[in-house]
Amino acid sequence: MKDTALTETHKALGAKLVPFAGYNMPVQYEGVTIEHETVRHGIGVFDVSHMGEFLIEGDHALELIQKISSNDASKLTVGKAQYSYLPNDTGGIVDDLIIYKIKETSYLLVVNASNIEKDWNWITSKNDVGATMRNLSDHYALLAIQGPKAIEAMQSLTRHDLSAIKFYNFIIGDFAGIEHVIISATGYTGSGGFEIYCKNDDVKQIWDNVFEAGAAYAIKPIGLAARDTLRLEMGYCLYGNDIDDTTSPMEAGLGWITKFTKEFTNSEALKKEKEHGSNRKLVAFELEGRGIPRQGYNIVDDNGIIIGAVTSGTMAPSLGKGIGLGYVPTPFAGIGNQIHIQIRKNTIPATVVKTPFYKRQ
């Protein structure tokens, strides 16, 4: 197992560490519900330094990115970020990612930790245009400072106006005494805040200063378990659960980041699928009875016939009810439709709902 630059810090804080994507990662500190509510109502900090970072540069950088990604990166200007995915050649998804335009011919791609090697090899195999590629994953750390109090609590750490950084925009500037830090108004929680990219050698200083500045706001470290409940309450997909090499982006509801104004990997097949419609769809559901849906549980119809499976599920701390995502045949996918979740020997009714499950006050 690899360590992040903050592994010893997490141990000292009493974190429960678990293997995740080849890294020792903190899954929780005080408990999932406490940490979840801290982010929803205050401010919490995740160490997500296991994520991958690729720098793609040169005159042909955009050409390569346009070829491998679904969204239209030509719309990016310096200081803006974009959610996208890497289609494979067979109708599935290599990974989902965020693309940052750093300079006119320089882009940072942030990919999932479990897919770093796979993504690197995939992009390299498509790089017949001569773009310069650098894998920075082992040298950079990433902190997600999330929650409605993040701007107020962190403003003292930078000369830049944090409130002026719009969603999916970023700056490169000073933060916590370190220069040339990426401060990005992105996150995976739905409660606002920032993601901070810095070198491994600088992350401990930033971590310490963040907690000092946030002390008056009851800042806490947050583990990956609460990160999962937070993202699920927003209906955000998790690679390996809700999307993977076998799931269609059209089925998964990712048509909004699939731009057919350009050619990209497998774009013709995806365009035909969008025109003809998918046989199944990823839906969000809320349980109407007691129970906790878990990944792999069967989804059944009124007659008990299996029609799908839960891909992500939890007891939502903010809602006090079981929620989940799963693929069902398209006729069952309409908002308000009734489905059923098999939880051990019980069959619990559930209703298909629109995401996000959680709506900020």
Image (cartoon, rainbow, N blue to C red):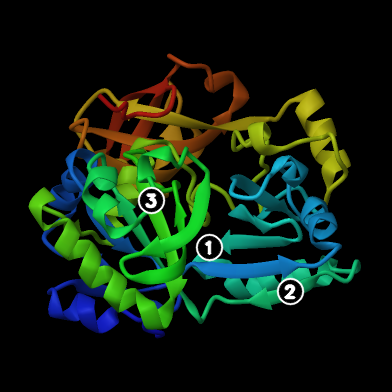
Answer whether labels 2 and 1 touch (C-beta < 8 Å). Answer: no
**Left or right relative to 162: residue 75:** right
Taking the image as drawn, is residue 4 in sight?
no
The residue tagged 1 is 112
- Numbered mark located on residue 133 in the image: 2
Q: x, y (%) of residue 208?
A: 21, 71
- Is 360 rendered above or below residue 216? above
**What residue is at 63 percent from the left and 69 percent from the top?**
54
- First reached walking from the N terminus: tag 3 or tag 1: 1
| Helix, strand or loop at mark 1 | loop
Residue at left offset 68%, top offset 58% = 103
Please state which amino acid type lies under the numbered disc 3. Phe
Q: Of label 2 and label 3, which has the lower sequence position?
A: 2
Label 2 or label 1, whichever comes before in sequence order? 1
Q: Position of residue 67 (x, y in %)?
A: 83, 53
Q: Residue at x 29, y 44 (%)?
A: 151
Q: In the rendered view, does 229 fall on the left or right side of 12?
A: right
Label 1 amino acid? Asn
Q: CA distance from mark 2 to mark 1?
A: 17 Å
The amino acid beneath tag 2 is Met
Q: Return the residue found at the far front.
A: 159
Q: Residues within 10 Å of mark 2 (few under 14, many from 20)?
A: some
Secondary structure under badge 2? strand
Q: Which residue is mark 3?
A: 194
State which mark lies toward you, 2 or 1: 2
Which x, y percent locates residue 235? Answer: 42, 36
On-image quarter of the N terminus: bottom left
Nearest the eye: 89 or 177: 177
